[in-house]
Amino acid sequence: MSTDDADEQLAFIRDTVRRAKPRTWRGALLADELPVARVVVDKGLLSLDKFFDYAVPANLAEEAQPGVRVRVRFGARVGAGGRREGGELYDGFVVARLATSDFPGVLAPLAQVLSPERVLTPALLTLCRTVADRYAGSLADVLQLAVPPRHAKAEAEPSPEPLPPPGFPAVGSWDRYVDGAEYLTALADGRAPRAVWTALPGPTWPEEIARAVAATLAGGRGALVVLPEGRSVARVDAALTELLGEGRHAALAADLGPKERYRRWLSVSRGSVRAAIGTRAAMFAPVRDLGLVVVWNDGDGSHSDQRAPHPHVREVALLRAAEEGAGVLLGGLSVTVEGAQLLRTGWARPLAAARETVRAVAPRVRTVTDLDQGRDAAAQYARLPRPAWEAARDALTRGPVLIQVPRRGYAPRLACAQCRTPARCRHCEGPLAAGAAGAVLECAWCGTAEPEWHCVECGSFRLRAQVVGAKRTAEELGKAFPRVPVRTSGRDSVLSEVSGEPALVISTPGAEPVAEGGYAAALLLDGWALLGRPDLRAGEEALRLWMTAAGLVRPAAEGGTVVVVAEPTARPVQALVRWDPAGHAAVELEERAQLHFPPVSRMASVTGAPQAVEDLLSLIRLPEGADVLGPVPAPGGRGQEWERALLRVAPGQGAVLAAALKAAQIARVALRSPDQVRIRIDPPDIG
DNA sequence: AGCACGCCGACT
DNA sequence: GTCGGCGTGCTC
């Protein structure tokens, strides 16, 4: 660049600043009012996670309002004579219109306004920013989760006129909960009651959710319900339609197709519909004047988003409630440790039934160890402990029987086939697993081969690893109970409902169909497989899965029986027998606190090639008292060794940890550290 | 991420 | 003297 060119450039910039009305590099005519558009560019790079200012051409002045989708040229370089060249077109959103820009250079113009629809509302923008910060992600990544793809035809249709608020609903079955009626009243009164709700077993919870929504709408505010899968969305959808009729709520199910989905999302965004329900993507639904956010069954893994930065429905719901002043209803048959923590800190109040109410509606729960001898021929054939077989046979005279079988491959650590003592490495006490060759045992921690394992407790040489899948269980039980229809519900074909006729219903956890009139009995098989998983949450998760199944069984007074095949002294088994999920969660929380585990501490995982992980760990500036655990070898690398480190900080330092991870990741990329590092706040699987 | 600019070694 | 190494910094 010659001296003349440089002077000209400086003069241009001075000119721009003085006139407070930037010219574009093409010199196009600019908007008279607010000629600067602040834009979030849809490029997920952490180092680009900020706003960029663009000049608003006069012809886009009307349409380029905050919240609209735009196209902008980004990444152009300045060529000879100060001219910009190249630069690719990116999607983005206008977040503000301004009179001036604090950018010292020359602004590029907006290339195009894709649509005048203001989809990124201020509340949604704030939420996405908060979520991005919480999860050490970029705003652009979160926006992709929060704002659905545009569908022009759906957008062209007007949304219907909003209906007036409904009347306050009848309290209905909420009267079974201590303070249940008061909770609904608080919602209708415009307050923000926050509750961890231990729902009673049985088929009434969808209706109870619907009443809470109706109470919120009655008070003139909006409501949001997020459930883990489409089947439960459909049930709450039906309950809402029953209570409110059509037109007051929108179900944002994933299987609707892009047009219908966007049409419904717009009806929420435009304020034409005040209540939204759906699966996890609905956590961002731009419900106006949010008065209540409901999360059902927050322990379900589906509530954790698979896409970066992996926000969790419960956490997003809590952030929204805090930001938007909404009430919270964190409900399920069981209670998560996170729920227990909200109770312990006093952030939320318990919403539960009195002990005698629970006893009146819960089924009778019996425990059986599968070490029980005395199997008769038929029971042996079906691989069932005799009491379980008898319970099924007895119940089949009265109705359908649910049999819950852990998924194949839901394999825990290897254990002695005889006494169930976990098989451990002789050197480091790590868990043994089948090695890469398949036949040889290896320690999953230190890799030492163990060719001659025998049980240290009972001397047996037999190991048990795999559970028998639902399909084979169905075959075997079919033979054990001839003339009884056998139905299966599992991964590939999930039944949502079965009739009240006697039948054996074999299901993997989470796929249990609802039975008309309730199941006469449920058998929860292979409990050891759930309890023995090498996961911090194994106990909590086992109880959740059992209660989900047991909650579909008739009350004890109507003969409803649950038989759980598991070690009777195990804490989750005892909690199931007592039907006390809240107590179980509270005890688990206490234990986690002592071990400095989440959710009391905040954790993050860092996974990738060893060098990349090391680079990140060397760059990160952790707060005082933070721990680095590992790195240790981790699965996931394709053809390459991967490592994973866990970072742990004290309660209250989650935001600092996220910020430090983000900064370190940016620094690592700037230093050309090779390969990717995956950062995950609140990793779901802590061995 | 791309893609520039920028400041030190071996070559026609 | 120049071509080119990849360190550092920017993208409105």
Image (tube, coloured by chain):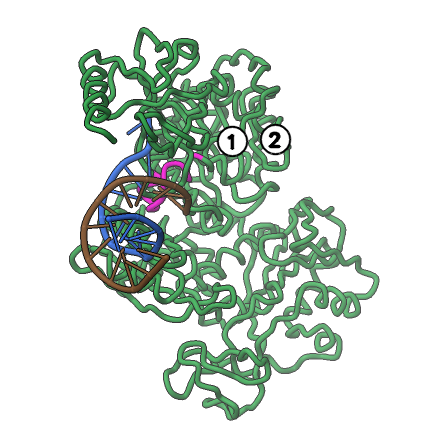
Chain colours: A green, B brown, C blue
* Placement of the C terminus of chain A among the 4 image quadrants: bottom left
CB-based contact (under 8 Å), mark 2 and mark 1? yes
Q: Residue at x 73, y 64 (%)?
A: A474
Measured from the top left, where is residue A501 in percent x and y? 76, 50
The magenta segment:
A130-143
Three-letter code for the amino acid on which mark 2 is drawn: Pro
Res A192 visible: no
Q: Residue at x 58, y 41 (%)?
A: A232
Q: Residue at x 37, y 64 (%)?
A: A644
- Horizontal arrangement in the rendering, residue A406 relative to residue A423 (left or right): right
Measured from the top left, where is residue A586 in percent x and y? 34, 56
Please tell me whether the stretch drawn in magenta is mainly helix, strand or loop. Answer: helix
The residue pinned by badge 1 equals A148
Q: Which mark is residue A258?
A: 2
Q: Earlier in the sequence, mark 2 or mark 1?
A: 1
Res A433 visible: yes
Q: Which mark is residue A136?
A: none
